[in-house]
Image (cartoon, grey):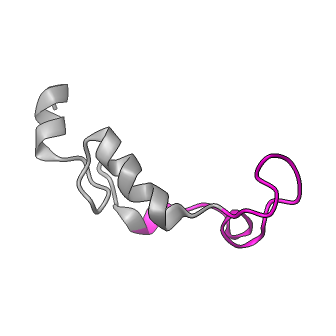
Amino acid sequence: MGRLGTEKDTLPERLLKTPMPEGVSKGEICELDKMLPEYYKLRGWTPDGKVSEEKMKELGI
């Protein structure tokens, strides 16, 4: 199953625009645009959210 890239990597709009109403993160919103590049890097994917050739070789795919 192939990755489609960043256009499919999202969260519900309420998590991206509505500040958290309570708890430790009260008043904050999810900054997905800042989080995704780091997530991709940690997974060994390309900056556009696709599995890199290196990662595929590492996994034997």
The residue lying toward the viewer, choosing from 45 and 19, is 19
- 46 relative position to 25: left or right: left
In the rendered image, the quadrant that contains the N terminus is: top left
Q: Main secondary structure of the magenta part?
A: loop
| Residue 1 visible in this rendered orientation of the protein | no
| Magenta stretch, residue numbers | 7-29
* Residue 53: percent from left, percent from top: 12, 44
Residue 28 lies in magenta, yes or no?
Answer: yes
Residue at image position (11%, 39%) is 54
Residue 54 lies in magenta, yes or no?
Answer: no
Residue at image position (66%, 68%) is 16
The residue lying toward the viewer, choosing from 48 and 18, is 18
* Residue 4: percent from left, percent from top: 34, 60
* Residue 18: percent from left, percent from top: 77, 70
Residue at image position (15%, 28%) is 58
| Residue 45 visible in this rendered orientation of the protein | yes
The residue lying toward the viewer, choosing from 24 and 35, is 24
Total count of labels: 0
Q: Toward which corner of the image does residue 60 lie, by quadrant?
A: top left
